[in-house]
Image (cartoon, helix red, strand yellow):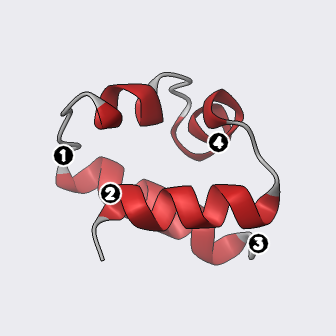
């Protein structure tokens, strides 16, 4: 499953807004919006987002 799909699933289950997730997980409120438009996060950002989701179960 791609990162964006995992984020969207997590976000819905955790009841977090698109910008709220980006702000909390990566200090970037536009993260999901940009990914929906084709942004490819770098490996460090991917690790940061995955660590956030692991630390904060939905």
Camera-near label (1 vs 4) is: 4
Q: Which residue is drawn at 56% across and 24% down?
A: 29
Vertical relation: 55 (above or below) 27: below
Mark 3 → mark 1, Cα distance in angstroms:
24 Å
Label 3 vs 1, first from the N-terminus: 1
Give the side of residue 22 with respect to residue 35, left or right: right
Quarter holding the C terminus is: bottom right
Q: Residues within 10 Å of mark 4 (few under 14, many from 20)?
A: many
- Left or right placement of residue 56 versus residue 33 in this view: right
Name the residue located 23 percent from the left edge and 43 percent from the top edge: 41
How far apart in space, not on screen, are marks 3 and 4 (Cα)?
Answer: 12 Å
Q: Which is closer to the viewer, label 3 or label 2?
A: 3
* Image quarter hosting the N terminus: bottom left
The disc, 1 or 4, on the residue closer to the chain's N-terminal end is 4
The secondary structure type at the circle numbered 3 is loop
The residue under label 1 is: 42
15 to 52, vertically: above or below: above
Tell me how far mark 1 sits from mark 2, CA to CA.
6 Å
The spot of residue 16 in percent (x, y) is 77, 46
Q: Do the residues labelled 2 and 4 touch (CB within 8 Å)?
A: no
Quarter of image, res 18 = top right
Q: Earlier along the polypeptide chain: callout 2 or callout 4?
A: 4
Judged from the image, the secondary structure of the residue bearing numbered disc 1 is: loop
The picture places residue 15, in percent across and down from the top left corner, at 82, 53
Q: Give the alpha-carbon distance from disc 1 to disc 4, as whole Å.
A: 17 Å
Q: Give the residue at x 47% y 56%.
A: 49
Residue receiving disc 2: 46
């Amino acid at each position: 499953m791609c990162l964006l799909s995992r984020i969207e699933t997590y976000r819905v289950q955790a009841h977090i807004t698109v910008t709220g997730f980006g702000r909390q997980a990566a200090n970037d409120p536009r993260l999901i919006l940009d990914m929906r438009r084709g942004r490819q996060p770098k490996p460090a950002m991917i690790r940061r987002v995955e660590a956030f989701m692991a630390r904060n179960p939905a």
